[in-house]
Image: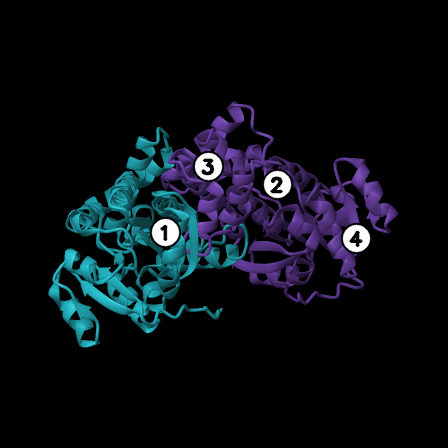
Chain colours: A cyan, B purple
Amino acid sequence: MSEEIARPDLTGQRVGFIGLGLMGKPMARALARAGAELVVTSRSPGPVAELAADGMIAATGPAAVAGQAGTIVLMLTDTVAVETVADALLPVLRPGHLVIDMGTTAVAASRALAERAAAAGAEWLDAPVSGGTVAAEAATLTIMAGGTDAAFARALPPLQAMGRRITHVGASGAGQIAKSANQVIVALTIGAVAEALALARAAGADPARVRDAIRGGFAESRILDLHGGRMVSGDFTPGGRVTTQVKDLRQAEELAQQSGIELPTLGLSLELFEMLVDQGDGALDHSALYRLFAR
Amino acid sequence: MSEEIARPDLTGQRVGFIGLGLMGKPMARALARAGAELVVTSRSPGPVAELAADGMIAATGPAAVAGQAGTIVLMLTDTVAVETVADALLPVLRPGHLVIDMGTTAVAASRALAERAAAAGAEWLDAPVSGGTVAAEAATLTIMAGGTDAAFARALPPLQAMGRRITHVGASGAGQIAKSANQVIVALTIGAVAEALALARAAGADPARVRDAIRGGFAESRILDLHGGRMVSGDFTPGGRVTTQVKDLRQAEELAQQSGIELPTLGLSLELFEMLVDQGDGALDHSALYRLFAR
């Protein structure tokens, strides 16, 4: 299925972009395609030079980005990286600055950073994404946003340049909560498909034909399609790595604990993915969970 | 999406049908709509009388059905019911008889019944279904078949009168294996969605908006759509009952044990659904698993 996506026109808008990794680089390019003038920086100089060669403005660091752009997108590895950048960014934030954190950051940290930004008169929107590098390159990311109505309204045009399904979930942290819920469903559904196909195989049926047979019924999911396909083909080239899944599940479990809720299957799923790391499969796609059961 | 379904013409074919419950009755009607002449029997006389009033032939029991029809469909509650009917049926089966068991029957029992039918020169196809009463009434069942190529080829026209997606998974028992795999995925995906939405709620977000935000991404599934919708609305009218889910998961766990495989999440899921029965929620839709976590 293809779908026409209404893209905004960002001509004349300056957008800062911090973090030009596998996700960040294609996202910055998508903003540029929409007409924005990009001011970019990243930990490693390679992608900065590459994007500068394409006409983007290279900045020396986070504070320099904030000096040249009112809207600043963060696409960083983890909560620690976001907090490190924030320490450089927050002292120079002024009223009118909008920071859009599109990485997967802990909910409590997101809320705290939004408060610190608000104290400087600036806005902080958490807007994590789903869809991986494929969706980043096609600018079809799913984006889940948390923050004030004003921050969301202002962020919407640049977000529309990078994503397709963009939802304002609620107040600060709500985007990160949605992302955690998303990761829990993805991990546990991979587990569901892995155990089911392993059962089929152990019981003497062909897992590929079993998968064909149940497609389109109540068992149908993106995971049965994509990750189930990897399980039956045995090709566990990532995609999403097992180690990333472990990191995301740990963050979800931390959120559960902080929220006073016990989630038994989440706990078990984390243990199983950790076993996969222990047996040396951490760099494989997370669908390799199948290998724990089907041998 | 709607889809044109090519229906077979069964005019002049006699089909026996044993078991006229919530599923069986609409399935028998679908066969009649395709032109088949139905010979029906069931444990309770009500539906037999009802279908006889519509022109179907009422038989006094399984053996009487076999005396009047070469192809016999079974749609019974469980393995014990199938074995009871088989005890009446097998002594009268002759070469040329084809029995199509469309209920959810244990794999080992299915294989044994197919062997006993073969000893009488008859064919036995396991062809369990997915989709529930809605799909039975629309004749859009997903059907997973196990048996010989000859049995499947002969069963295909009547199956096409009742279903949309029909797969010959493999030898006898393979249809039941696929059904078990299907049930494992359904149950565990319900668990995934339940824990994720409960996490979202406990962490302070609106589960309905979180569900909206993650639709269409990697978390997308029929379960997030249908059962996730029931969780956010709090309407747990079945649908598929918790008690049925427990029965199906016990059967899947039995199959896993017989197949020498350990499936930890399946075991945990069974425990959680059993807890739901213990707290008095057995008659609710299986999406009520959400109530274990979100209060």
Tally of marks: 4
Report which residue position mark 3 lands on.
B254
Report which residue position mark 4 lands on.
B38
Specify which label sits upstream in the sequence, 2 or 3: 2
| Mark 1 chain | A
Q: Residue at x 32, y 69 (%)?
A: A30
Q: Nearer the viewer, mark 4 or mark 2?
A: 2
Image location of residue B119, percent across then percent down = 60, 50
Task: Let me know if marks 2 and 3 both belong to one chain.
Answer: yes
Give the Cα separation between the discs numbered 4 and 2: 28 Å
Image location of residue B252, percent across then percent down = 47, 40
SS of the residue at dot 1?
helix
User: In terms of depth relative to the viewer, which is nearer, A110 or B58?
Assistant: A110
Report which residue position mark 1 lands on.
A151
Query: What amino acid type should be assigned to the residue bearing mark 3?
Result: Glu
Q: Nearer the viewer, mark 2 or mark 3?
A: 2
Q: Give the quarter of the image for residue A24.
A: bottom left
Report which residue position mark 2 lands on.
B239
Residue lying furthest top: B279
Q: Is residue B28 left or right of residue A98?
A: right
Q: Residues within 10 Å of mark 4 (few under 14, many from 20)?
A: many
Give the Cα separation between the discs numbered 4 and 1: 65 Å
User: In terms of depth relative to the viewer, which is nearer, B274 or A257?
Assistant: A257
